[in-house]
Structures are given as structure tokens and as C-alpha cells.
Image (cartoon, helix red, strand yellow):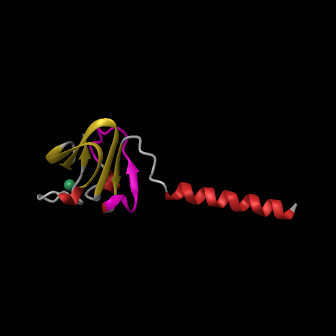
């Protein structure tokens, strides 16, 4: 009995590790603190977020799914320069005008 119980615990731990290593479930526009989708992340749904709160000027990479595109704006309320991202993944520092750590709203 004791051996069987220990075996079941081992299986459960292995499954949890696999789930933990997977990419986050992406329902919409996800911003990541670091490049290559690392660090903290937050799913902002389908956009239309006029102010990002604690995520202001913080994002370094983005994934877009569930919506055709997302516009990441330099300032709150969809103002200033913006970059349009289609479905997929991208790095905000990959652009000459430096959008890393600059996003303040998502349209
Ligand atoms: Ca900004």
C-alpha cells in the first residue's frame, strides 16, 4: 500500500512539471516583462486597455492570439507612437525606434 501511494505522488509531480514548463494559455494579447516571453506575463484579453497600471512601460515581448491584431501605444488612451502586431509573437526591442519598456495602452 505504501509503495503504491508513493508511486502515485511521483506521477503527479511529473505531470505538474510538464504543465509548468508549457507556455501560458494565451487567450488574447499577452505582455511579457522580458524578451523571449520571459519573466512575469499578463493576459490583457482582446485589447482596448487604455491604461496598463503596473504594466506601464514594462513589456519587452508580446504574443497575440484570438484577435486579428493589437496596437501597442506609447502613451495611455491610445496616444503617441504605436506598433501593430498581428497574430503571433514578437519582441518590442526589435524596432529601430525602441519600443522596449514603452507600451502604455493596447488598442
Ligand atoms: Ca509609455
Q: Residue at x 85, y 64 (%)?
A: 2
**Magenta region: which residues?**
36-51
Q: Quadrant of residue 84?
A: top left
Q: Quadrant of residue 29?
A: top left
Task: Give x and y (percent) for residue 99.
Answer: 19, 57
Image quarter of the C terminus: top left
Image quarter of the N terminus: bottom right
Q: Residue at x 50, y 59 (%)?
A: 21
Farthest residue to the right: give it. Answer: 1
Q: Residue at x 33, y 48 (%)?
A: 63
Q: Nearer the viewer, residue 2 or 57?
A: 2
Q: Nearer the viewer, residue 21 or 54?
A: 21
Task: Give x and y (percent) for residue 10.
Answer: 70, 62
Task: Give x and y (percent) for residue 71.
Answer: 22, 42
Q: Quadrant of residue 41?
A: bottom left
Q: Residue at x 35, y 58 (%)?
A: 37
Q: Nearer the viewer, residue 99 or 4?
A: 4
Task: Give x and y (percent) for residue 35.
Answer: 30, 62
Amino acid at each position: 500500500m505504501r509503495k503504491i501511494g508513493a508511486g502515485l505522488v511521483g506521477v503527479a509531480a511529473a505531470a505538474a512539471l510538464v504543465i509548468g514548463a508549457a507556455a501560458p494559455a494565451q487567450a488574447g494579447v499577452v505582455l511579457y516583462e522580458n524578451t523571449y516571453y520571459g519573466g512575469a506575463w499578463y493576459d490583457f484579453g482582446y485589447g482596448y486597455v487604455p491604461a496598463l497600471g503596473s504594466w506601464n512601460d514594462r513589456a519587452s515581448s508580446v504574443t497575440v492570439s484570438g484577435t486579428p491584431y493589437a496596437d501597442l501605444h506609447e502613451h495611455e488612451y491610445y496616444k503617441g507612437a504605436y506598433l501593430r502586431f498581428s497574430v503571433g509573437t514578437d519582441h518590442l526591442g526589435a524596432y529601430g525606434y525602441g519600443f522596449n519598456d514603452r507600451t502604455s495602452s493596447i488598442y
